[in-house]
Amino acid sequence: MRPAIAIQRAAMAGVFFLAILVQCKAASPEEEERFINKVKLAFQNEDSAAIDALSCHDGIPSEGERRDDLLMYFNHTVTGAELSPPDEAEIHDLDSNLRVTKMMRVWLSGWYEPIRFPVGEKNGHLMFSLSKRKIPSAFGEAEFRSIEAQFLALQKRRSIVLRDSAAEKSRHVVALKMVYSRAKSLQDRCSEFRKQGGVGTGYDERYLTTINTELRIFGADFPEESYWTNNDEERVEPKIIRDPETRISYKLNADGRRITAVAPNGTVLWVRDPFRDGHLQPLRVTRPVITRFQLSPGTKEEAEEGEHIFLGDYSKRRIEIYFNSSQFGVVSLKTGRFVFVGQN
């Protein structure tokens, strides 16, 4: 081999080896501290974009995993976070887009066990690793979305049709019954799918009740009994509550839906409609409105003085809201983000 060629190949091998070293370079203690602090700050600010920026999306399909699953924990205060070596059992079947070198463990107030997320390294920086697998669509999901779109289109016309002729109301009821039949058929097939061992369906179990409630509004005789009230014109008495720490005021508007946050200097910080933001559906009444509007307790003693939604954390106040449809949830004081808790 000629000397020039040997030298060239040796140089290329050296560059290749150096590239591997750079890629596999372990994150420094300073980088670990930076990553932990970034994650804590994202939780504190309820910043989903920050979590997304800390995630590696290389090789992830559009139907693949995202770190949106962290959003459900934002209503809790982070009491601790650490990076530690992963157990083999935790990572053996992950199929991650980064080699998992650490597990991020986050402790939340009121929780006995930490939540865990795999973390890898890219060019010396720590990032959340994601699974390269496509997330399969749930059984019946596409059909359910079609049914949902058809129903919502009809529901939007409710106030117009209620004031229309009897013939138009009759046509509207026929269209609603067709949607109901499609939803009932899908529910039966999803139930059979689960009986045969299938896991995960795209069907929302509350939907038959929702469609049936809409039918009862028009006086339609349908198999399932449902109690409803037409309250399209209902308004509520405006109410203001104030955070004792920040002095920020939160106003429930007269429409019973919108909440406005106002700083002490009069600046409007945000305006939110929890019912719309939470993608809730009418239940028992045609237009659910907020009838209870209060701050969550800051201590156990406060909690015992009245009825509250307990989320295991007194250190982070929220707005508790209850709709006259029996649906309820909490609203973040900082961002106005609504989390649906349940319904009776």
Image (spheres, rainbow, N blue to C red):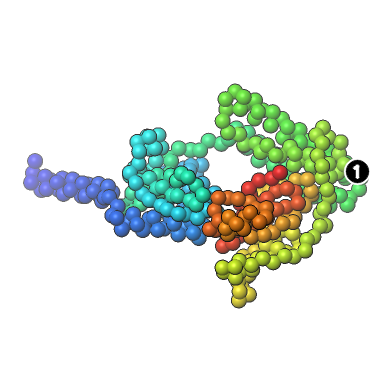
Most extreme residue toward the bottom is: 265
Q: Residue at x 45, y 54 (%)?
A: 79
Assess disc 1: are there few (<14), some (14-19) or many (≥20) residues with their C-alpha within 10 Å of its C-alpha.
Answer: few
Query: In screen coordinates, is 98 left or right of 252?
Result: left
Most extreme residue toward the top is: 196
The relative height of residue 239 versus residue 36 in the rendered view (above or below) is below
Query: In screen coordinates, is 214 left or right of 19?
Result: right
Q: Quadrant of the N terminus?
A: top left
Q: Quadrant of the C terminus?
A: top right
Nearest to the observer: residue 241 or residue 334 = 241
Nearest to the observer: residue 30 or residue 130 = 30
The x and y percentages for residue 111 are 50, 47
Number of numbered markers: 1
Q: Residue at x 38, y 55 (%)?
A: 35
Most extreme residue toward the right is: 166
Label 1 SS: helix
The x and y percentages for residue 237 are 77, 63
The x and y percentages for residue 129 are 40, 45
> Which quadrant holds residue 37?
bottom left
Nearest to the observer: residue 181 or residue 269 = 269
Q: Residue at x 73, y 32 (%)?
A: 184
Q: Please say whether residue 95 is visible from this viewpoint.
A: no
> Which quadrant holds residue 171?
top right
The x and y percentages for residue 172 are 83, 43
Amino acid beneath label 1: Ala
Q: Residue at x 65, y 40 (%)?
A: 145
> Which quadrant holds residue 139?
top right
Q: Please say whether residue 328 is visible from this viewpoint.
A: yes
Q: Which residue is mark 1?
A: 167
